[in-house]
Amino acid sequence: MAGICTYGGYVPRYRLNRKLIYQAMGWMNPANIANAKGEKAVANFDEDSITMAVAAGLDSLNGMDRNKLGGVYFASTSMPYKERLNAGIVSAALGLGDQIRAADFSGGLKAGTSALLSALEAVGSKGVSNLMVTAADCRLGQPASPQELIFGDAAAALVVGDENVIAEFKGSFSVTCDFGDHYRGANAKFDRQWEDRWIRDVGFDRIVPEAVNGLLAKYSLKIDDFSKVVYDCQYAAARKKLNKVLGIAPEADQSNLQQEVGHCGAAHSLVMLVAALEAAKPGDQILVVSFGSGCDALWFEVTENISHANGAKGVSGALASRADLDNYTKYLVWRDILPGDTGLRAEEDLWTRWSALWRNRKTVLGLWGGKCRKCGTVQLPPQKMCVNPECGAVDQMDDYLFSDKIGHIASFTGDMLAASLNPPAVYGQVVFEGGGKMLFDFTDCDMKEVKTGMAVTMSFRRKYYDAGRDITGYFWKAVPVKEVE
C-alpha cells in the first residue's frame, strides 16, 4: 500500500509582526488593517525556496536511511531557476546519489499536492520504492498590497513509500481549470491577484466544494468520516461559510496557520498536513485539499505506525524556534525590494565556474568530506592524501557526510566590513564531533549570543547571488543551537 512514511517541516526563524508592516505602509492602503493581525514567517536573507525545501527534507529523513530514497519531487512557484533542475540541487544537498529520479512541479498553487499525487502513483505502480516530496515557497507581495501581509514563508516534506506507512493513501479527486486568481508573469517580481470577492464567490465557493463533493461521491464517504480536513483558504469569512456548506465540524477544521506563518503558496496544504499528522491517531481519516488553478482532494487513513513516527522537528517544533524581526526595512532589503549599500566589497564579481562546481559538487552541495580507510581520520574538505602526519595514505578516502553532524565553535568573529545584508557578518572555525574542522559563516544567530564551544548544526543556505547573471550559489552555514549544548 502506498502512503506517507515520514514527514518534516520548516518555518524560518524570523517572524515579522504584521502591525509593523501596517504602521509603515498603512497610509497607502488603510483597508489592509483587516490583514494586520498576527505575524508572518520571513525567510532569512540567505534563504529561498530551495534552502527551505532542503531543511524540511532533512527533517523528514530523521531516523531514515537516505540511501533508500529513489527520488525527489520539488514543488514551488518561486524556484530560483527556470532552466536548471531545482530538485537536482535539493537532492544533492540532501546527500543523495546521482542514480535517482528528480522533478520540479510548479505553475500553480496546487503544485504541492500534484507532486504528492505523482509520487503516490509512482510508488503504487512499483516504479520506485521511496520518493521524497518537498514543497516550499517564498512569494512576494508588493509593499502596501494585501499579499504582503497575507503571505508567509515555509516548507514541508513527505517521504512516500509502500512499507511502514503512517498514513495510507486511499484515493483522490482533482479539478483543473484556468482560474486566474493569482498570477505572476515570467519576469514579474510580485504576485498579482484579481478581485477578492470574485476569488471567494467563484473560486472557494464553487471549485473547492466541487473537488470535495467529487471525492465523497467517488468513494461513498461523508464529510463526518474525516477526523481532520486540511484546506488552505485564508479568507476568514469564506472559510466559515465553506465549513457550514460542506458540514465541516469545528474540531475537524485544521488550522491554516495564517496568524503564525501566513499563506506559503504551493507548500501550504502540505505544511498543514504535516501539522495534522503531528497530532494524528491510528484510524484517523484525513482529507487534504489544495486550491490553485483548480483543486486536488486527497484521502489518507492514519495507521498504527503513527505511534512510531520519526522524531522530526516538524511544523510545531519550527514554530517554537522563533525570533522577532523587529525592522520592516530589513525585510525589504533582504527581499531586494529596497536597495541597500553593503559597501565596496559587495562589488566583487562572484561569477560561477561551472566546471569547478561540477568537480567539487559533493562537497559544495552535500557537504561531503573524507575518512581515511587506513587510520580513520576524518577531514573536510576531502583530500587526496590523509592529513594525519602519522599516516599520509594516498587515495584511501571514503565519503563522509558532515551535514548531519554536530559541530562546536572553536573561534569566531563579527565583521562589520564584510559585505552582508545582516551585519555584522559572523564566521569562524567549526570543529565537528568525530573529527573535521573548517571555516564557516554563521547564520540565524545574534552576535551577542555566540560563544566559543557552542554547539552548531549545519544548514544549507544561499552563499552568494550574482545579479548580473541571475545565478544563486549555495553552500552550508553553521547555526548555533543552544538546545544541543
Image: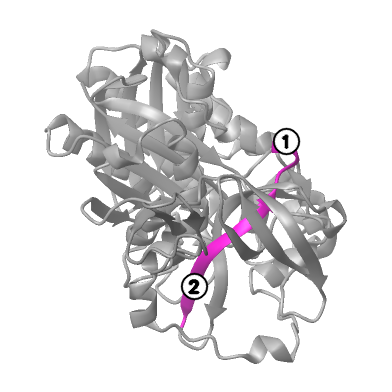
x and y, in percent, of residue 8 in the image: 48, 36
Residues in magenta?
470-485
Q: Is residue 176 left or right of residue 135?
A: left
Q: Residue furthest front?
A: 390
Task: Using the rendered image of the protein, determine whether residue 18 is visible from the camera's viewpoint.
Answer: yes
What label sits on residue 483 in the rendered view? Answer: 1
Image point 68% across, 62% down: which residue?
A: 429
**Is residue 437 shown above or below 348?**
above
Please identify the quadrant where the C terminus is shown.
top right
Q: Quadrant of residue 223?
A: top left
The disc, 2 or 1, on the residue closer to the chain's N-terminal end is: 2
**Is residue 52 shown above or below 319?**
below
What label sits on residue 473 in the rendered view? Answer: 2
Task: Using the rendered image of the protein, determine whether residue 107 is visible from the camera's viewpoint.
Answer: no
Helix, strand, or loop for circle 2? strand
x and y, in percent, of residue 97 in the image: 28, 53
Please identify the quadrant where the N terminus is shown.
top left
